Amino acid sequence: MPRHPFSNTRQRIEEESIKLFAARGIAETSVRDITRAVGISEGALYRHFESKEDLVWQAFERNYVAFSQELEALAAQPPGAREKIAAMIRGFCKAHDENPTLFNFMVFVQHGQLAKMPADAPTPVRVLRRVITRAIEQHELPPQNPDLAAALVLGTVLQTATFAAYGRLDPKLQPVSGRLIAAAWAAVNSTAAAA
Amino acid sequence: MPRHPFSNTRQRIEEESIKLFAARGIAETSVRDITRAVGISEGALYRHFESKEDLVWQAFERNYVAFSQELEALAAQPPGAREKIAAMIRGFCKAHDENPTLFNFMVFVQHGQLAKMPADAPTPVRVLRRVITRAIEQHELPPQNPDLAAALVLGTVLQTATFAAYGRLDPKLQPVSGRLIAAAWAAVNSTAAAA
Amino acid sequence: MPRHPFSNTRQRIEEESIKLFAARGIAETSVRDITRAVGISEGALYRHFESKEDLVWQAFERNYVAFSQELEALAAQPPGAREKIAAMIRGFCKAHDENPTLFNFMVFVQHGQLAKMPADAPTPVRVLRRVITRAIEQHELPPQNPDLAAALVLGTVLQTATFAAYGRLDPKLQPVSGRLIAAAWAAVNSTAAAA
Amino acid sequence: MPRHPFSNTRQRIEEESIKLFAARGIAETSVRDITRAVGISEGALYRHFESKEDLVWQAFERNYVAFSQELEALAAQPPGAREKIAAMIRGFCKAHDENPTLFNFMVFVQHGQLAKMPADAPTPVRVLRRVITRAIEQHELPPQNPDLAAALVLGTVLQTATFAAYGRLDPKLQPVSGRLIAAAWAAVNSTAAAA
DNA sequence: GATGAATGAGAATTCATTCAT
DNA sequence: GATGAATGAATTCTCATTCAT
């Protein structure tokens, strides 16, 4: 599997794969579909990836790790919990708007790739959870299950992204990131009412 | 291969299909997998469903419509907007807890089945959106994009369900429904801060 | 295989089969197609026929023998060779016009049924050949290969029937039977020119 | 399973297909039969043809067009109507004798392929019909329905080919082409007797 | 690096036939 | 006589992967 610095074929395979995976799903995309989109022969793909599974993984892993690290960096900068969470939500929106296809692939289409991540790798959920746990410890947030709190924040962003993908909302999330931050912050600060 | 004289084969096919679809995905589940799980031959399935696609649709449609109608009924009863939304969230949690597999299939696994629903059929999203639109008109909620508000409510519930499916949260949602209601209500009442 | 005299189910199966066989071909017609056309269950067909193959054979044999015998009778009556051949051609046209579907099934669609006929059974070709052989012996026709002569007569009728089936000619053959007789008689009386 | 590096697999598939189609019929020949005859795997066939239907069509179309064009060329050369028809009949006989299997496939076995030919493509029937129409206009033939006349000529040749295929006549048609020409010419010059 | 024919396993589906009711 | 679910083999076709060139 040579990573030839002067060949962008590998890169193009990954890009086209992500497009097709996001549009139709992984199982519904054949190696033939991919190689045809790239403009290479079927055999050529196997110069760059060991298998289709490997291709899926590579396409996922690199981008997912990069995204997670970016979120991590964003969360590291500001001082308070609210600002950390706000920065992460803005990071989600920015990633989405810059490449909705990649965003949807990473978040919605990847099938079981998440389970292959090493247990200590940074992921958006883990980064978010850590910020929230710390905030609860520091009394910046009321005491609560940090996983549930993470779900509330994440749900705010991801369901909005889903609606955008379905055409039910504007394709751009950044214009509503302020609202999403306010909503998420309100949610994690809410207290259970009597059911 | 016994011929079960008093068993409803069609029903059993649907049930096993939903289990397998929810566990592995639709494309990843073969007709063979299904019929093996049911204990019939592959050909026998086609006595009950015209095609795999038809089976997916039948398994989805009936349950989805029933769920949507239940939500609709729940939203019709109480007077205020907050109580309507609370009733719906409780409905989501109840449906999830009663049959998480079916819930996950309907909400997360169905692939493109939603697009086959007639435009006027009730769906959870449409019911929720209608309640929210009305509430905004009646000044029970601040003025806002009703689709975005619907995403905030839905995201609260569905991301929690996702975390439950991943084992990151308790498998039962009903115990936290009060918290989800509070969070959703806080979210739709929040106001965008400066981004 | 009861041939119940008061049941016409068997008869209806044969009739619908012939229609379907003629329209689509034997291999292209399934038992299900047939039973649906008749309005009975799939299993019921096997009360009347041992197998699909048996059904094809039964549907062919009875009609083919009847047709052959009719031709034989027609050829027996008139005295001269020309009149015998004319009677047979008229018989072909009449059989065609009375039931084109049956005619096409017997002549064009039956696949290998002919080979199952016992070697001494009367068939249109054998009847025709015998008439011609006799005619040559009696010097009513010039000396020639009787099989080739039979082909010339038969080709005249059958190709016309083919064109009728394709809509290239009128669906009725009887109006042109006079012409067909003249053509066939001219053909068997022709002498090979230098090739 | 050897990979024949210098053999034209596509060509061999077509050839074996035609043999099998002519021997058993199209529906009665499975893809498996074909690929076994060729000595390749089933999947390999689909590298060369999109589907079995496509294979049938390709096998038919190319040969049929070639044959039709040859007939057209043969009919174009000689001056008189009789010579044109004679040339065509000789063309039929030559095509038959050179490759009876292909001839039978094109003429008798093809099922519905004819209907796929574009309306303006040359076919043997159209060529023959045109020659006859012209001959009638030029008073080289008595006035008559040109389609019926075409049937008379065609029937002469094709029924002879049928008898040859059934072993009822010599497998070679060219030796009797003179007789066929005389018979066909006599037929189209005959006048309807009283029926 | 690249090609594309070939493989072999497996996919969905059809179908003649059987059989408990 | 009739039903129709069930069978099991066969059919067409797809697909990830290999490999000679």
Image (cartoon, coloured by chain):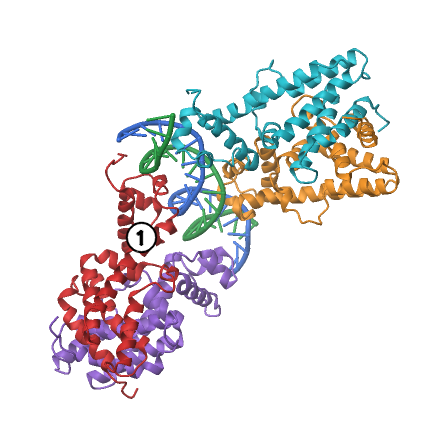
Chain colours: A purple, B red, C cyan, D orange, E blue, F green
Residue D152 position within the rendered picture, expressed as x and y whole percent measured from the top left: 76, 32
Residue hosting label 1:
B59
- Please tell me in which quadrant of the rendered image residue E18 appears: top left
Residue B188 position within the rendered picture, expressed as x and y whole percent measured from the top left: 24, 79
Is residue B41 rendered to the left or right of residue A37? left
Q: Relative to the observer, which residue lies in front, A160 or D156?
A: D156
- Please tell me in which quadrant of the rendered image residue C129 appears: top right
Q: Which residue: 63% across, 44% down?
A: D115
Is residue A39 rendered to the left or right of residue C189? left
Q: Is residue A122 visible?
A: no
Residue E15 position within the rendered picture, expressed as x and y whole percent measured from the top left: 45, 35
Disc 1 secondary structure class:
helix
Quick one: quadrant of the C terminus of chain B? bottom left
In which chain is the residue bearing label 1? B
Q: Which residue: 25% across, 64% down?
A: A118
Q: Relative to the observer, which residue lies in front, D5 or C188?
A: C188
In the displayed structure, D157 sits above or below C120; it is: below
Quick one: quadrant of the N terminus of chain B? top left
Residue D130 position within the rendered picture, expressed as x and y whole percent measured from the top left: 79, 43
